[in-house]
Image (tube, helix red, strand yellow):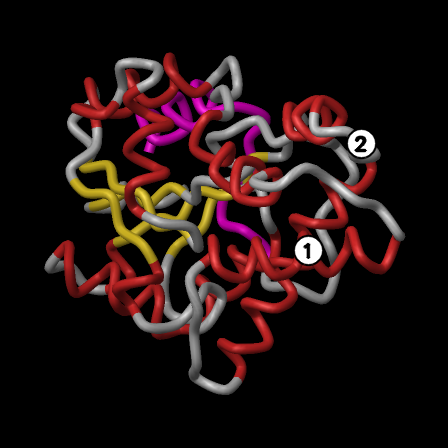
Amino acid sequence: MTGTPAVIVFDVNETLSDLSVLDHRFIQAGLPAELARLWFTTVLREGFALAANGETARFADIGADVLDGLQKAAGIGSPAGTTQRLVASMAELPLHPDVADGVRGLRAAGHRLVTLSNGSAEVAERLTASAGLEEQFERFLSVEDAGVWKPHSGAYQYAAQRCEVPEDQMLLVAVHPWDLHGAARAGLRTAWVDRTGVGYPSYYARPEVTVASLPELATVLAAA
C-alpha cells in the first residue's frame, strides 16, 4: 500500500458482526437454519434493486417483508412477533474475535474510523457498544441518510462528504467484494478482509489490500 488514507470506513454486517449466529436465532424461533443466510442475501438483493433505480428503503423494513415472504413460500408458520424479533437481532450479534484488537490498534495509530452500513446507524452503534468500542469511531454512517444503498456511488460520496475528505482519501474495509467494487468505482481505496479463503471474484475491481484480519490491516497500514 502506498501512503495511508485519511479515514478508514468499515462496513458493518459480516465485516464487523458475526452473522453465523443468526443460524441459531432462526433455530430458536422454530425456523430452518439455512433460512437465515437466504434471508440476508435476499434483503441485500432487494436493496440493490432499489439502488439501481436511485431508490431506497430501510433495511429493517425490507427485512421484515422478505422474512414474511420466505416463511409463506416455505409453508412455515411462526408465532406473532417472530419476524420483528429476528430482524431486530441484527443489533445483538457478536463481533468477530479480531475486531476489538484491530479497531483499537488502528485508532491508537491515529486513524480516523467511521462505519458505513446498509443497515441503520443505531445497529452499528449498539454492536460496537456491546464490545466497548463505540468511542473508537468518529461517526456511524448509514445509507438511510445517504438516500441510496451501497454499492451505489452515492452512498460512498455521502460518507466522504460527512467526513469532509475526498473519496480517494478514504479506505473502505469490507468482507464483501461487491461493496469493495462499488467503493473503488466511486474513487475510494479498498481493503478486503478475507475471512473465508474462497478467493476474490475476477469480475470485480481488485482490492488494494487483502488481509485475513483487522490486526493484520493495522500492520499493513503502519508499514505504509
- Residue 213 vs residue 46, the one in the foreground: 46
Q: Look at the numbered discs 1 and 2 and tell me whether their residues touch, using CB distance below 8 Å.
A: no
Query: Taking 126 as reference, is 101 above or below it?
Result: above
Which residue type carries mark 2?
Ala
At 15% across and 59% down in the image, what residue appears? 162
At 45% across and 72% down in the image, what residue appears? 152
The label on residue 131 is none
Asked whether 165 falls inside the magenta stretch, the response is no
Position of residue 147 in the picture relative to residue 160 (left or right): right
The label on residue 68 is 1
Position of residue 88 in the picture relative to residue 167 (left or right): right
Secondary structure under the numbered disc 2 in the rendered image = loop
Which residue type carries mark 1?
Asp
Q: Position of residue 184 (x, y in %)?
A: 46, 64
Secondary structure under the numbered disc 1 in the rendered image = helix
Boundaries of the magenta span: 206-224
